[in-house]
Image (tube, rainbow, N blue to C red):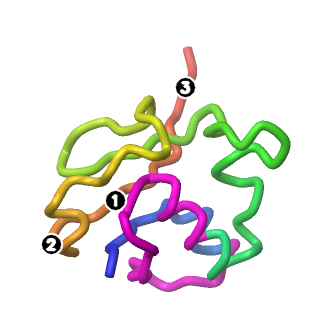
Amino acid sequence: MIWIIIPAHLRTLSRVNGDLRLQVEEPPTLGSVLDALEAAHPMLRGTILDLRTKKRRPFIRFFACGEGWSDEAFDTPLPDAVIAGTQPLRIVGAMAGG
């Protein structure tokens, strides 16, 4: 089971209280986690990935084991600690301003 932490606004949209745990097809990759997340919570479709291009939306970032994963290819295998469920995959809504 993959442990996923999503931002508060996406928890509200998907009616999820707290963190998520999802079973993901082998091998667990960033892309397979996002596919499983959208399949389990269809209301999130288009909020994390653009529906047309399937690219990460601006101001959404991914982190695994304390490292940025936003620019990783979606077919990159996740770190062992994330696969084991001991570390979360964090989906973060970034902020900007000036």
* First in residue order: circle 2 vs circle 3: 2
- Spot occupied by residue 39 in the image (x, y as percentages of width and height): 67, 76
What amino acid does circle 2 point to?
Answer: Thr
Q: Is residue 25 magenta?
A: yes
Q: CA distance from mark 3 to mark 1?
A: 22 Å
Q: Nearer the viewer, mark 3 or mark 1?
A: 1
- The residue indicated by pointer 2 is 86
Q: Residue furthest front?
A: 26
- The residue indicated by pointer 3 is 96
Q: Give the side of residue 57 with respect to residue 83, left or right.
A: right
What amino acid does circle 1 point to?
Answer: Leu
Which region is colored magenta? 13-37
- Spot occupied by residue 21 in the image (x, y as percentages of width and height): 39, 82
Q: CA distance from mark 2 to mark 3?
A: 30 Å
In the rendered structure, find residue 89 and report the number of the disc placed on it.
1
- Spot occupied by residue 6 in the image (x, y as percentages of width and height): 47, 63
Instruction: Identify whether 16 is placed above or below 89.
Output: below
Q: Quadrant of the N terminus?
A: bottom left
Q: Give the side of residue 26 with respect to residue 32, left or right.
A: left
